[in-house]
């Protein structure tokens, strides 16, 4: 099986639109496995763990980045960028 994720740089990754709140993301995706703080020099941002991807939000709980970890899923992850599968 595979998971296709459409990437629009600076706009969205899949259904997650940059600028959404953590609350909006949680309503859409469900509760994360875990949540931790991140940042430098102060750890005031949030990392929400959804198994094979992390959603990162700033101190105001606004979505600002995503990290994808294909090694944590048995499914093939296909990124769609510029209407091309990568």
Image (cartoon, rainbow, N blue to C red):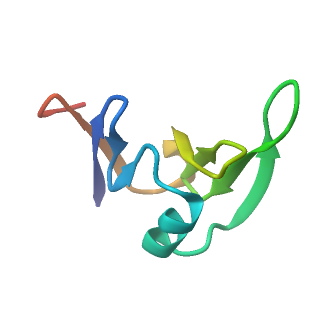
Residue nearer the viewer, 25 or 74: 25
Image: 49 above or below 9: below
Percent from the top left, x then y, of residue 61?
A: 64, 52
Can residue 50 be seen from the camera position used here?
A: no
Query: Does residue 57 show up?
Result: yes
Q: Residue furthest top?
A: 41
Residue closest to the far front: 60
The percent position of residue 71, horizontal first and vertical second, equals: 54, 44
Q: Is residue 29 left or right of residue 37?
A: left
User: Where's residue 54, x and y in %?
Assistant: 59, 48
Q: In which quarter of the image is the N terminus?
A: bottom left
Residue at the right extreme, as displayed: 42
Toward the viewer: 49 or 17? 17
Residue 32 lies, with reference to residue 41, above or below; the image says below
Residue depicted at x 74% and y 59%: 35
Query: What is the x, y in percent for residue 79?
Result: 29, 38
Image quarter where the C terminus lies is top left
72 relative position to 4: left or right: right
- Residue 53 placement, left or right of 76: right
For the point 57% across and 48% down, the residue is 62
Q: Which residue is drawn at 79% across and 53% down?
A: 36
Please give the count of numbered marks on the rendered protein: 0
Where is 46 relative to 41, above or below? below
Q: Is 75 above or below relative to 24?
A: above
The residue sitting at 38% across, 48% down in the picture is 17
The residue at the far left in this view is 83
């Amino acid at each position: 099986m595979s998971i296709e994720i459409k990437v629009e740089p600076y706009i969205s990754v899949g259904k997650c639109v940059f600028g959404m709140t953590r609350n909006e993301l949680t309503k859409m995706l469900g509760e994360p496995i875990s949540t931790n703080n991140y940042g430098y020099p102060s750890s005031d941002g949030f990392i929400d763990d959804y198994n094979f991807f992390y959603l990162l939000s700033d101190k105001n709980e606004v979505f600002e980045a995503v990290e994808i970890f294909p090694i944590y899923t048995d499914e093939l992850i296909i990124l769609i960028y510029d209407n091309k599968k990568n």
